[in-house]
Amino acid sequence: MNNKIQLTPDIISKLDNLSLKARMIVEGFIVGLHKSPFHGFSVEFSEHRAYGYGDEIKHIDWKLFGKTDRFYIKQFEEETNLRSYLLLDQSKSMDYSSSNLSKLDYAQLLSASLAYLMIKQQDAVSLTLFDDKIIDYIPPRSKTSHLKFLLSQMNKIKSGKDTNISPVLHQTAEMIKQKGLIILISDLFDNPEEIIEGLKHFRYKGHEVIVFHVLDKQELNLDFNQNTRFKDSETGEEIITQPWHIKQDYQKSIHKFSEYFKHQLRIHHIDYVVLKTNENLDIALSEYLIKRNRIM
């Protein structure tokens, strides 16, 4: 009998330390790679590489040579494989939760796990936090100390003001000077056409893009069985209704909303992934590795 506990996002979120959460998620994911179709992906956790012709002797790690009797070169930031830019939506609507884990909690876990995985592969990582404007921008770096700083900033995340995604996308596209992988993590509760235009701006600048569309399962299903008060977290508007009367029409609308993004983003070669907050983060990490493997 298998008594192994499934490390769901809800269970992991109960831990206090964000670094520990990220490490558990990523290490569990890496173990799972060996049992999945993704086992061919290379996930390097070394900060060294073998000495090769043309390398400068001054960069040899002599301590490691003493232990291994082989020459290794210390990896430096300019040798990074890929620059990734995490754009994390922390607007009011991201604070919604039908369980113990809000969309913002889930997005925080996802961002931390991606940053952990990226830096362990010597990829440089940037973080942009936003609501109706950019709250914080941390330029890309690939050192372990940078991961600690990123996680410390993520740990302070709280839901902010209303959503206004498009101007943030355009501003960030102009601000970033080096091509890389843009990863938007948001519930996308804003004008879809304007969001698409903002994401197209990144493609025009030569970036690759992934959109992780984070939603609570109730936002997809509207599975309530009693009179319910619904409140718009950003406008404060409220209605009381019997959800079963509007459930079918609502589900059609949210499906149309998601399909619009899926279709439009496919046209512009942007990856689009819907993530429910009750789903394991393996889905997102796999999508990231697929994308990384495709562009490297």
Image: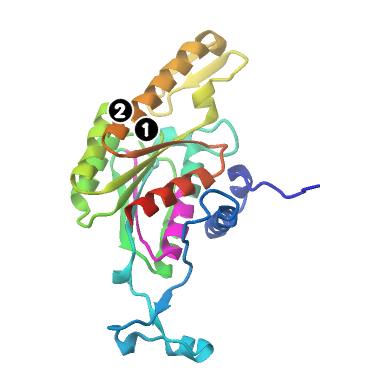
Residue closest to the eye, 184 or 263? 263
Give the quadrant of residue 23: bottom right
Numbered tag placed on residue 192 in the rendering = 2
> In this image, 14 relative to 190: left or right?
right
> In this image, 123 relative to 36: left or right?
left
Give the quadrant of residue 232: top left
Residue at numbered disc 1: 188
Q: Is residue 235 visible?
A: no
The residue positioned 34% from the left and 85% from the top of the image is 59
Residue 296 percent location from the top left of the image: 33, 57
Residue closest to the eye, 88 or 52? 52
Q: How is the image coloured?
A: rainbow
| Amino acid at the residue labelled 1 | Leu
Residue 103 percent location from the top left of the image: 49, 38
> In this image, 160 relative to 12: left or right?
left
For label 1, the SS is loop
Please state the total of marks drawn on the protein image: 2
Query: Label 1 crowding class (10 Å Cα cut-off): few <14, some 14-19, many 20+?
Result: many
The residue positioned 22% from the left and 34% from the top of the image is 197
Is-magenta flag for residue 214? Answer: no
Residue at the far top: name it: 245
| Amino acid at the residue labelled 2 | Pro
The residue positioned 56% from the left and 43% from the top of the image is 280
Question: Mark 1 near mark 2, Cβ–Cβ under 8 Å?
Answer: yes
201 to 24, vertically: above or below: above
Residue 48 percent location from the top left of the image: 42, 76
Is-magenta flag for residue 119? Answer: yes
Residue at the far right: name it: 1
User: Magenta region: which residues?
Assistant: 110-131
Q: Mark 1 to mark 2: distance in Å? A: 7 Å
The residue positioned 62% from the left and 44% from the top of the image is 8
Q: Is residue 283 visible?
A: yes
